[in-house]
Amino acid sequence: MPSPQQQATPRLTPRAQAMHDFKRMVRWIAAAAVLMVIGALGFLSHTDALSIHAVIATVLGVFFSVLLGCGLFALAFFSDKSGHDEEVAHGSSRQDED
C-alpha cells in the first residue's frame, strides 16, 4: 500500500516533469550566477581595481555570461527530457508512401 505522501503526489507527464526540472535548474543557475558575481567583485576589490564602471561591467558581464552558458545547457537537457528531440527526429525522417 502506498504511503499518504505518494498518494497525494499527482503523476506528471514527461513534458510537465521536464518543465518542473527546468525551472528548478534555472533557479540554481541564477544562484550560481549571483555567487560568481560576488566572487568576481571580491577579486576586483582584492586587487584594488574596483570602480563604478568595473562593478557595472563585472555584474552584467559575469551574471549574463553564466546565465546564458548554463541556461543553454539546461535547455538542451529540457529538450531531451521533454521529448522535443524525438518529435523532431520522427518528423524530419522521410518515409516512402509507395
Image (cartoon, rainbow, N blue to C red):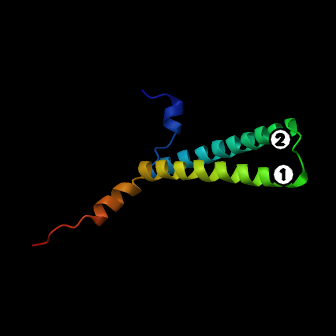
Query: Which structural element holds mark 1?
Result: helix
Q: What secondary structure is marked by label 2?
A: helix
Quarter of the image for residue 31 reads top right
Q: Which of 55 and 35 is in front in this view?
A: 55
State which tag comes first along the sequence, 1 or 2.
2
Q: Which of 37 and 27 is in front in this view?
A: 37
| Residue 98, horizontal then vertical, whole percent | 9, 73
Q: Report the side of 58 relative to 79 (left or right).
A: right
Q: Position of residue 66 (x, y in %)?
A: 65, 48
In the rendered structure, the answer to whether residue 91 lies left or right of residue 39 reads left
**42 or 46, nearer to the observer:** 46
The amino acid type, in three-letter code, at marker 1 is Ala
Q: Pick the quarter of the image with the N terminus.
A: top left
Residue drawn 83% across and 41% down? 44
Question: Which residue lies under the disc numbered 2?
Answer: 44
Kindly identify which residue carries mark 1. Answer: 54
Q: At label 2, which amino acid type do we have?
A: Leu
Bin the neighbour count of mark 2 within 10 Å (Cα to Cα): few under 14, some 14-19, many 20 and up: some
